[in-house]
Amino acid sequence: MIRYSVALGLLAVCVFFASDKDFRWISALLLRLPESHTLLLTPEELSRYTGTPDSPGLYLAVLGQVFDVSRGRRHYSPGGSYHVFAGKDGSRAFVTGDFTETGLVDDLSGLSPLEVLVINDWLSFYKKEYPFVGKLIGRFYTNNGEPTEALKQAETSIYEGQKLKAKTQLDNLRFPPCNSEWSAASGGRVWCTTNSGGIQRNWAGVPRKLYSPGSRGFHCVCVQVVNDISSQNNRGELDNPNLQVYDNCPPLEESCILKG
Ligand code: HEM
């Protein structure tokens, strides 16, 4: 009992001397601290943290995790380019760029794994750059702060996205993208250099249309030319059935003009 009174007394002293900001933390702590010691906020509580003069602070949420973005107030406070994210979980808009009311939502339905991965990259950014505040009760966390089915689905998507990204990176090493340019006067051109597609290598290669199984159309990739091109046995990737030579472009030409 005495210990309790001392604790209460200490809390009273803290509250008395606390600044406005500290007070917010103390009141928030008294509001809701589950067993995991993570603060839980409702969407209504979060919606007050928009950085307006009468608001208790400047928070935003990504995938249900709340961050104190006061340090980035030039972006997030009223008048800032990204104020639209303040006081809410607008996860979807982090990848769609749709900053309208209907776009600034935490519903991820219809997004591809690579898109959900982009949102997760933003989450990593906020974890690194801003203090974590707690979890948002709703789509991604239950009233007890437990992950919801929607969060588990998002995590599966992120995992799929990571696998796809790794595969794309490997494919890009094998078939680096071409450089390309287009002008109304001279039409289009694709060409290969030792760093086209952002892939540094010691060969430039020759442009080919790559028709990837399962995707529509083609994109231009650079294909390495093997030393002995006349060899019937080792022509590298040049005879790969998914690759096609550009019309009117000699097979070993490093630059192709696109007509039509
Ligand atoms: C999906 C579209 C986009 C989203 C979700 C987005 C989101 C953001 C966010 C949240 C920040 C603040 C990061 C922080 O806390 O430090 C930021 C900063 C910035 N964004 Fe964007 N952005 C988008 C598109 C763009 C585009 C198209 C441009 C340029 C044409 C751009 C230029 C910038 C710049 C220059 C900063 C840094 C400003 C500074 O440090 O003063 N953003 N962006």
Image (tube, rainbow, N blue to C red):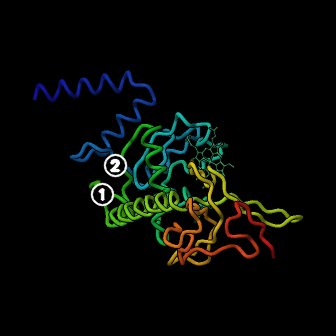
The secondary structure type at the circle numbered 2 is strand
Q: Distance between the Cα atoms at labels 2 and 1? A: 8 Å
Residue lying at 42% horizontally and 37% vertically, measured from the top left: 131
Left or right? Give the position of 225 relative to 25: right
The image quarter containing residue 230 is bottom right
Instruction: Kindly tell me whether mark 2's CB lies below 8 Å from ligand 1.
Output: no
Which residue lies at the image location 38% right of the left edge and 50% below the top edge? 41
Query: Which amino acid type corresponds to the residue marked 2 in the rendered image?
Result: Leu
Name the quarter where the N terminus is drawn.
top left
Q: Taking 247 as reference, is 176 above or below it?
A: above
* In contact (CB < 8 Å): disc 2 and disc 1: yes
Q: What residue would you read off at disc 1?
A: 143
Q: Quadrant of residue 42?
A: bottom left
Q: Eyeballing the image, is 57 above or below 102?
A: above
Q: Nearer the viewer, residue 211 or 249?
A: 249
| Label 1 CA crowd tier, 10 Å (few <14, some 14–19, many 20+) | some
| Residue closer to the observer: 12 or 170 | 170
**Residue 236, x across and y down, in percent:** 52, 66
Tell me, for residue 40, which label it has, or none: 2
Which residue occupies the extreme left position in the image? 1
Q: What's the residue at 66%, 65% (across, down)?
A: 207
